[in-house]
Amino acid sequence: MIMIRVILFSMCISLILSCTSSSVNQEEKFERIVVTEDTYDINSFKSSGLKTNKQYNVEFLPEAIDAWKGVFSKKDIEIRIYISQEDAKNFGIKFAENVTGDDAIVSGEGILWSEGAKDRRKCVPREATSESGCDQKARYGDFIVFGNTVILCEGLTKNESMTVCYNLKNSVIKSLEK
């Protein structure tokens, strides 16, 4: 009788452990740099469903040839376009890291490229306070380098942002295959 209880107890523990380990939310692994020989322009993104609403002046964004703000699947997107993927990596990553993620600089002197800076931040209500107001946070949780572009994507977490970026990237690839 004791032996049966021990076996049943062991089986229950095994079952509980197997269920909980599979339900743990693990972040997907996304590559920040998507290597491709293809080059893209803003029309490549428009044909995949991106709705553009603002073009930026890239005079002070080193080596960039174009930059746009838009919306894809109800999420804000910023696309910075370079001549090549090498230029996107060498000149674009530093500027994208500056304004994305939890440690993003969203206002003040530390912003490397001030054009469109207001578009890259959002007002997040303060927690546990009855006071009005908000904290300025980065609109874009992360970014990818896709071909000759740097794509900044909205999201509350890096994983959510990367999912948006990858959905846009996949949509561009699909629309160009037609």
Image (tube, rainbow, N blue to C red):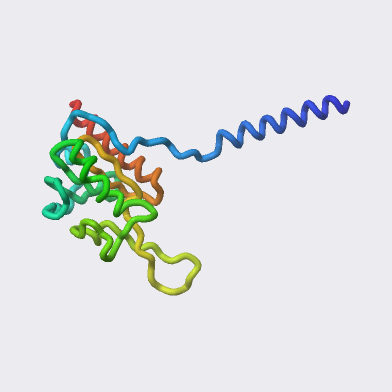
From the viewer's perspective, is residue 77 above or below residue 177?
below
Residue 47 x/y as whole percent: 17, 37
- Where is 20 relative to 77, above or below? above
Q: In the rendered image, which quarter is residue 148 located in?
A: top left
Q: Residue furthest right?
A: 1
Residue ID at (13%, 39%)? 83
Residue 173 quadrant: top left
Question: Count of labels shown?
Answer: 0
Quarter of the image where the N terminus is located: top right
State the residue lying farthest toward the bottom. 131
Q: What x and y, as percent, mark residue 23?
A: 55, 37
Left or right: where does residue 78 sit relative to residue 64? Answer: right
Name the spot of residue 162 as percent of width and height, x first: 35, 42
Left/right placement of residue 129 relative to residue 21 reads: left
For the residue pair 41 and 33, the one nearer the viewer reads as 33
In percent of the image, x 21 and y 45: which residue is there?
91
Which of these two is toward me, 118 or 15?
A: 118
What residue is drawn where x is 43% and y is 66%? 126
Q: Which image quarter is the C terminus in? A: top left
Can you give x and y, in whole percent of width and height, for residue 59 in the image?
11, 54
Q: Answer left or right for 120 relative to 13.
A: left
